Image (cartoon, helix red, strand yellow):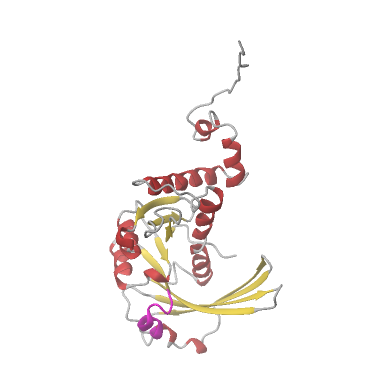
């Protein structure tokens, strides 16, 4: 069984699609830890998601962290910002960084056996993932600050309904060495990063973020922060699931919010309405 590093912090951006019609939608960048809690969120000024992510990293209140971000953030500036804070990075490298991609793609992958392989089934499809890992050093050279391991992750997906098979190859770089991030943990960390998409789904489908047309001042950003806080609290409670807990609290709006936060225990009573 693969275990996700308990200090992993996942960073990703999300647009508020219902706000500011006809204009550029506000873009928020958030950080979530391995316990699925929101650690912080900032607005991307001038829609610069990379700068927003670096600002968020600079202000994270954690001692140690493996910072994982998607391919948009695979750049020297972000990697260096992570290293400067004393953190480690896990960066996804795709074709949007052609020079770096060409370097890692040219490494001697064919001479390696798979370091780890997983097979999963669900949602009408079968998925196989393999990972090969190279330690950087000696003959293995990459012109990128702090990189000590690079992995090639290959995914095959088989849609059982249509029979269609798709294939994808991506590369991941990390500044954490093999003693602290072994193949099973490396694979789990790569997969765990995309768990942040579940937060986007909750905010949109459970709390109606994309449907919200509120657009005055900083109200959209403030409400997005409240949705993060609410989701963090409900996930910490556990048991019934976020949607069920939301509905239960909504049915007792004068008592359960305070009880849920441990601030008060209030007995709700109703008085019959006098008609005369």
55 left or right of 244? left
Residue farthest toward the top in the current orientation of the protein = 276
* Residue 221 locus on image (x, y percent): 38, 49
* Residue 275 locus on image (x, y percent): 62, 13
Q: Is residue 44 magenta?
A: no
Report the residue at 38% width, 75% height from top: 148
Camera sees residue 73: yes
- Asked if 51 appears above or below 107 in the picture, the reply is above
270 left or right of 49? right
Q: What number of labels is visible?
A: 0
Residue farthest toward the right in the current orientation of the protein = 161
- Asked if 24 appears above or below 227 in the picture, the reply is below
Position of the C terminus, as image quadrant, is top right
Camera sees residue 137: no
Q: Is residue 96 magenta?
A: yes
Which span of residues is magenta-colored? 93-103
147 left or right of 123? left
Report the residue at 49% width, 51% height from top: 209
- Asked if 162 appears above or below 228 in the picture, the reply is below
* Residue 40 locus on image (x, y percent): 38, 51
Report the residue at 66% width, 78% height from top: 164
Report the residue at 56% width, 52% height from top: 205
79 left or right of 18? left
């Amino acid at each position: 069984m693969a275990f996700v590093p308990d200090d992993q912090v996942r960073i990703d951006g999300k647009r508020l699609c219902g706000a500011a019609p006809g204009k550029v939608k506000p873009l928020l960048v958030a950080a979530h830890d391995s316990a699925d809690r929101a650690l912080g969120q900032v607005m991307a000024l001038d829609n610069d998601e990379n700068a927003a992510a670096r600002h968020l990293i600079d202000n994270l209140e954690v001692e140690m962290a493996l910072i994982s971000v998607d391919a948009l953030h695979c750049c020297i500036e972000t990697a260096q910002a992570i290293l400067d804070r004393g953190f480690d990075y896990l960066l996804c490298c795709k074709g949007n960084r052609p020079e770096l991609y060409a370097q890692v793609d040219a490494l001697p992958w064919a001479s390696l056996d798979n370091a780890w392989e997983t097979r999963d089934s669900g949602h009408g499809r079968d998925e196989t993932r393999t990972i090969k890992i190279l330690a950087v050093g000696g003959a293995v050279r990459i012109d990128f600050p702090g990189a000590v391991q690079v992995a090639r992750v290959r995914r095959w997906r088989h849609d059982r309904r249509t029979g269609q098979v798709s294939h994808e190859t991506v590369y991941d770089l990390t500044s954490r060495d093999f003693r602290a991030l072994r193949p099973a943990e490396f694979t789990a960390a790569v997969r765990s990063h995309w768990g942040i998409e579940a937060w986007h789904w909750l905010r949109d489908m459970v709390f109606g973020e994309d449907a919200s047309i509120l657009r005055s001042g900083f109200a959209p950003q403030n409400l997005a922060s409240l949705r993060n806080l609410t989701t963090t609290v409900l996930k910490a409670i556990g048991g019934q699931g976020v949607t069920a807990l939301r509905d239960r609290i909504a049915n007792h709006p004068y008592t359960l919010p305070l009880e849920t936060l441990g601030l008060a225990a209030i007995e709700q009573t109703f008085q019959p309405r006098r008609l005369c």
